[in-house]
Amino acid sequence: MKRGKLGGIVLGVFIVVVLICLWKCSVRVPTGYKAVTYHLNGGISKDTLDEGWHIVPPTVVKTSLYSIGIEQSYLTSEDKGDSPKDESFKTPTADGKSLLVNLEFSYMFDQDRITTVFKKFKGQSGETVKNTFIKPKMKAWTQEVTAKYPVTDVFGDKRQELNEALDTYLKQKFDPYGIIIDTVNFTSISTDDETQAAIQKKVNAQQELELANIEAKTAKVQADKDKEVALITAEQDKEKAAIQAEQAKIDAEGKAEAVKIKAQAEAEANKEIAESLTPELIEKQKIDKWNGEVPKIQGSDTSTIVDTRDMTEPTEE
């Protein structure tokens, strides 16, 4: 009986030891991460661990996790994401002004260079690297970019250019460390009241100038349009006048031709009449036109008109 109890105790102890060993030798890699292991007798393992559970040798003394999926991070004054306290920061401008900025960015570790990251940061985990390297460098390198822009450009039409320049610069600076910057954006930029008032004054002046330019361009466009309309109208009037003149010419030529034809017809008729007149015909026409009255003779003022029809022969007594 005693032997049975002793055997059970030994078995139980053995199981506990095995479980402890399994627990000590197992590693869980979350989704979106890779792990680098450091062996006591061999240093950094060449093979990284993918997501899931893994049994590692007892010689592994350190395992570090690195995110190979996109991680969102914040440097803001709000309690947001991984920025539970005020992490907004000041950054200079080219004209000596100071800006207070809030920033958000996304990043990941290059999965093909995870072991390089492990070596470069002496085995620190990805989370530790973010807090001790990525965020501080994000501030420092942002200051290098904004220092190239005057404050009026930051609040003016070059805000987008500044953001693009920052994105490009940070990607270049972090890449040698095996850190990939996916996106970076200013969520807010502010400055002191005096500078803000000066900026607003310049913006207003710029807007007034742009408005004046727009009005001038509009006036020119309208003038050009009126000129074009006037030219078109003049051309139309010219064409209309030419058409009217051509029509008048045609009408005049028609009338002249009609008169000419009529004159030629009359001349032809008169010629025919003249050729048809003979002395006998003339005498006949005289007789046909005589109304039977005898012509009267009219003399001087003291003369009398004598009608030959009243002169009759005297009768014999």
Image: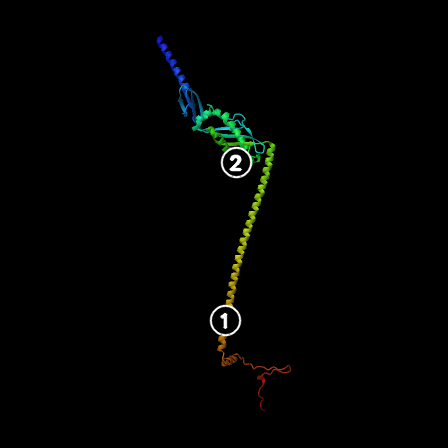
Indicate the quadrant containing the C terminus: top left, top right, bottom left or bottom right.
Answer: bottom right
Mark 1 secondary-structure assignment: helix
Q: Residue at x 60, y 35 (%)?
A: 198
On the image, the x and y values in percent for residue 12 come to 38, 13
Q: Residue at x 60, y 39 (%)?
A: 205
Q: Which residue is mark 2?
A: 161
Q: Is residue 253 visible?
A: yes
Residue 55: numbered disc: none
Amino acid found under the numbered disc labelled 2: Glu
Give the crowd class for mark 1: few <14, some 14-19, many >=20 residues within 10 Å.
Answer: few
Label 1, label 2: how far apart the Cα atoms are: 92 Å
Residue 264: numbered disc: 1
Q: Is residue 80 visible?
A: no
On the image, the x and y values in percent for residue 263 come to 51, 70
Classify 301 as above or below 11: below
Indicate the quadrant containing the N terminus: top left, top right, bottom left or bottom right.
Answer: top left
In the picture provided, is 31 more to the left or to the right than 219? left
On the image, the x and y values in percent for residue 289 come to 52, 78
**Of the residues under marks 1 and 2, which one precedes in the sequence?**
2
On the image, the x and y values in percent for residue 224 come to 55, 49
Q: Give the colour scheme shown.
A: rainbow
In the picture provided, is 14 more to the left or to the right than 149? left
| Residue at far bottom of view | 317
Mark 2 secondary-structure assignment: helix
In this view, the mark in front (1 or 2): 2
Return the residue nearer the eye: 206 or 240. Answer: 206
Classify 151 as above or below 57: below
Q: Residue at x 51, y 65 (%)?
A: 253
Amino acid found under the numbered disc labelled 1: Gln
Classify 175 as above or below 229: above
Give the crowd class for mark 2: few <14, some 14-19, many >=20 residues within 10 Å.
Answer: few
Q: Residue at x 55, y 51 (%)?
A: 227
